[in-house]
Amino acid sequence: MSSGAIVAYNAFLGTLTAAPLTCGYAVHSNRIAALDRGELPAVVVEMGDEPEPTGEAITLGQVLRYLDVTVAVLVDSATPYTAADDALIETYDLIVADLTLGGACEFVDEGETTRERDGAGVGSITKTWRIAYRTQRYSLLTGD
């Protein structure tokens, strides 16, 4: 048995790993694995926080819950933002092609995009997504 957050995250990750990315970048579920293996360029999909459910989200004994997920494209390049752009676009297109993640959630909303670069040439573009999913009022499990 898994929480609704785990179900939503796995559906999101599954959307990006169902087939190899055409850009050729590997998809990892955490940044440390990608960096430790030296597998750059890479796409890293990480589970984030879950904001508190709001009163308006309660309907018929259910709660609309949210999970933040980040998709970071990591590259080692003199021009990291340009090098990461194709993977950013491809992962974006895969997610927006089905905003219910195959029915695993209510919807996925796009969040901010940030860019970072370290002094050694490794850079990243990170896109944040917010997944909305329903559970019973006093349960963390999805309400199928």
Image (tube, rainbow, N blue to C red):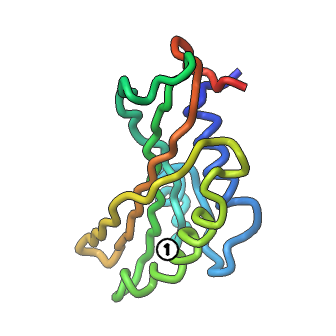
Instruction: Look at the numbered disc 1 and give the secondary structure of its residue.
Output: helix
Total marks in image: 1
Q: Nearer the viewer, residue 126 or 76?
A: 126
Horizontal placement of 59 versus 116: left or right?
right
Residue 75 lies in quadrant: bottom left
Residue bearing the label numbered 1: 88
Q: Position of residue 47 (x, y in %)?
A: 48, 43
Horizontal placement of 95 versus 54: left or right?
right
**Residue at image location 73% in from the left, 70% down from the top:** 20
Q: Nearer the viewer, residue 39 or 136?
A: 136
Horizontal placement of 18 versus 81: left or right?
right
Q: Position of residue 53 (x, y in %)?
A: 39, 27
Q: Position of residue 130 (x, y in %)?
A: 45, 48
Q: Residue furthest left?
A: 119
Near mark 1 (Cα within 10 A), the count class, few <14, some 14-19 or many ≥20, is many
**Residue at image location 39% in from the left, 84% down from the top:** 77
Which quadrant is the C terminus positioned in?
Answer: top right
**Residue at image location 55% in from the left, 16% down from the top:** 61
Q: Nearer the viewer, residue 34 or 66?
A: 66
Q: Position of residue 71 (x, y in %)?
A: 48, 59
Q: Residue furthest front?
A: 60
- Say what amino acid the circle numbered 1 marks: Leu
Residue 76 lies in quadrant: bottom left
Vertical arrangement, residue 24 with respect to residue 128, above or below: below
Vertical arrangement, residue 45 with respect to residue 4, above or below: below
